[in-house]
Image (spheres, rainbow, N blue to C red):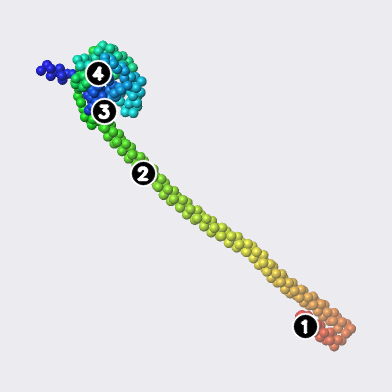
């Protein structure tokens, strides 16, 4: 019962099946003192990738990392895959399943250059040395001793929590993106509808303006035509009045001449009457004085009568 409780309380070293098989085929197939690096996400510390240190400096009892090879790999994998170095793995001869003091000293110093909450530091027994086995250890930051861990091999298609969160975020982002697209479509549609409405109203305004302009032009043309007619009429009336006045004046002049002629005739007649009366008095005096005879007076009267009738006839 205590052993079960102890096993359940152990930390877990989770590793994907592909990375586990890589360890078996490389470190596990060689004599002791070879190794490599473990890569994964720092939030779940699951081993997703293993890089074998194939150019390491090794002896039957020592293993030294080939930093010229591994450091560029750390940067490359981070840049390309977003995975961090979360552990160091190497092999020991059978019977030495724990980290040596030089191992703990070296791995503890790595927290300064690559801070982590802990490192996964397993020790491997190899097939050439008597059989394959991974002795899982966890070295926590700030501690000088390791904790024995339980190995859990996960399938390569294992859905990580971070990926599930990512999927949820992707779903939210997808919904947000869909709503964003809808907003863009609605905005474009609103702008298009507004533009069409503006053009329609503008067309009505232009038509109304043109119609009013045409009406005003026609009204102005009619007004100008009426004014021209009135001007022509005024000119005609002004030119006609003098001719009427001239005719009236001519008629008046003609009448005046006729009246003057009558007055002259009347004046002549009056003169003739006075001369006849004067002649009659003269002839009467001559007759009374015995200067002329009655026959002479009769002859004189006859001649005067004849002369008077000629004057009245216009001769």
- Between disc 1 and disc 2, whose residue precedes? 2
Give x and y (percent) for residue 54.
30, 23
Question: What is the secondary structure assignment of the residue under circle 3?
Answer: helix
**Mark in front: 1 vs 2:** 2
Which residue is the extreme one toward the left? 1
Q: Nearer the viewer, residue 12 or 184?
A: 12
Question: Which residue sits at x=19%, y=15%?
Answer: 95
Q: Is residue 58 left or right of residue 1?
A: right
Q: Is residue 210 above or below residue 274?
A: above
Q: Nearer the viewer, residue 249 or 232?
A: 232
Near mark 4 (Cα within 10 A), the count class, few <14, some 14-19 or many ≥20, is many
**Mark in front: 4 vs 3:** 4
- Can residue 165 be seen? no
The alpha-carbon separation of the residues under discs 4 and 1 comes to 189 Å
Q: Circle 4 sits on which residue?
A: 32
Give x and y (percent) for residue 259.
72, 72
Q: Circle 1 sits on which residue?
A: 309
Q: Circle 3 sits on which residue?
A: 162
Q: Nearer the viewer, residue 166 or 98?
A: 98
- Between disc 1 and disc 3, whose residue precedes? 3
Question: Which residue sits at x=32%, y=36%?
Answer: 177
Q: Circle 2 sits on which residue?
A: 189
Near mark 3 (Cα within 10 A), the count class, few <14, some 14-19 or many ≥20, is few
Which residue is the extreme one toward the right? 291
- Between disc 4 and disc 3, whose residue precedes? 4
Q: Nearer the viewer, residue 220 or 180?
A: 180
The image quadrant of residue 48 is top left
- Between disc 2 and disc 3, whose residue precedes? 3
- Can residue 3 be seen? yes
- Between disc 4 and disc 1, whose residue precedes? 4
Q: Which mark is residue 97?
A: none
């Amino acid at each position: 019962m205590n052993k079960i409780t102890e096993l359940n309380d152990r930390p877990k070293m989770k590793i994907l099946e592909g990375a586990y098989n890589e360890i078996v085929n490389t470190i596990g197939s060689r004599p002791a003192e070879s190794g490599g690096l473990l890569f994964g996400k720092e939030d779940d510390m699951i081993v997703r990738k293993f890089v074998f240190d194939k150019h390491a400096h090794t002896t039957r009892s020592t293993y030294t990392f080939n930093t010229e090879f591994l450091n560029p790999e750390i940067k490359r994998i981070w840049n390309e895959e977003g995975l961090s170095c979360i552990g160091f793995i190497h092999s020991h001869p059978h019977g030495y399943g724990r980290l040596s003091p030089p191992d703990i000293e070296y791995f503890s110093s790595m927290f300064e250059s690559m801070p982590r909450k802990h490192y996964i530091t397993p020790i491997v027994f190899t097939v050439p040395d008597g059989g394959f086995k991974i002795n899982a250890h966890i070295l926590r930051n700030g501690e000088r001793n390791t904790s024995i861990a339980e190995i859990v091999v996960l399938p390569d298609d294992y859905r990580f929590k971070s990926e599930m969160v990512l999927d949820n975020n992707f779903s939210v982002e997808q919904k947000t993106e869909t709503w964003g697209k809808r907003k863009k479509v609605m905005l474009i549609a609103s702008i298009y509808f507004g533009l069409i409405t503006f053009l329609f109203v503008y067309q009505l305004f232009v038509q109304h303006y043109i119609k009013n302009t045409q009406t005003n032009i026609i009204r102005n043309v009619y007004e100008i035509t009426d004014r021209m007619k009135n001007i022509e009429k005024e000119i005609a009336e002004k030119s006609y009045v003098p001719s009427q006045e001239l005719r009236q004046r001519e008629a008046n002049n003609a009448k005046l001449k006729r009246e003057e002629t009558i007055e002259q005739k009347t004046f002549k007649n009056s003169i003739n009457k006075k001369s006849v009366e004067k002649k009659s008095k003269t002839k009467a005096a001559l007759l009374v004085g015995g200067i002329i005879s009655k026959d002479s007076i009769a002859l004189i009267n006859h001649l005067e009568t004849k002369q008077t009738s000629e004057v009245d006839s216009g001769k």
